[in-house]
Amino acid sequence: MPRNALQFNLTRDEIAKIYYELNDINSNNEYVKRCLIILMTEHGVHLKVIANLLKISKTTANKWRQAFLSDRWEALKVKKVGRPQKKLEQTTRKYCKTKITSSPLKTVHNVKN
């Protein structure tokens, strides 16, 4: 006998809050992932598919689903201490800048014949 899919029965306000967080550039990456887990679960996406799409374990995805069931939004908040993670864009720009400055073409032009 198949199990019933987990449903949160989100209100319109809760769905709007999720979409706001997904579109907010200042949202923490981990918080966005947690919101996606909740949104996909609400739309009936299987746990295994959610885990594969977000590149996390099924255990982690299920942990956040269960936490949301018990404490709603309070459970999803990021409670990290210490230095915050760099934004993805900053890391990408730094990587591209490093690749351009250490390009093999640059060293070819500096060679004297």
Image (cartoon, rainbow, N blue to C red):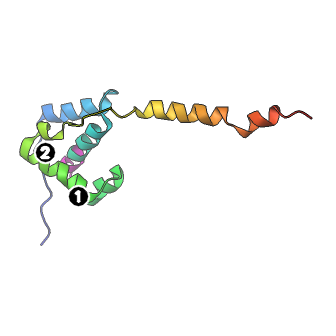
Which residue lies under the disc numbered 2?
68
Residue sitting at x 26%, y 58%: 58
Q: Position of residue 61 (x, y in %)?
A: 23, 52
Q: Is residue 104 left or right of residue 69?
A: right
Q: Mark 1 points at which residue?
A: 59
Q: Position of residue 12 (x, y in %)?
A: 14, 34
Magenta stretch in the rendered image: 39-46
Instruction: Name the residue at the right extreme.
Output: 113
Residue at the left extreme? 70
Left or right, residue 92 beside residue 23: right
Compared to residue 11, the image places residue 58 above or below, namely: below
Query: At 29% from the left edge and 40% from the top edge, which residue is drawn?
Result: 30
Q: Which amino acid type is marked by label 2?
A: Phe
- Looking at the rendered structure, the secondary structure element under dot 1 is helix
Q: How far apart are marks 2 and 1 (CA)?
A: 14 Å
Is 31 placed above or below 47 here?
A: above
Residue 85 is situated, as x and y percent measured from the top left of the image, at: 36, 34
Q: Which of 66 and 91 is in front in this view?
A: 91
**Residue 55 visible to an observer of this rendering:** yes
Instruction: Pinpoint residue 81: horizontal percent, then vertical percent.
Output: 24, 35
Q: Would residue 8 be visible to someone looking at this image?
A: no
User: Hey, which residue is sitting farthest front in the picture?
Assistant: 82
Residue type of the residue flagged with mark 1: Thr
Q: Quick one: label 2, few (<14), some, or many (20+) residues within 10 Å?
A: some
Height in image: 64 above or below 105? below
Secondary structure under the numbered disc 2 in the rendered image? helix
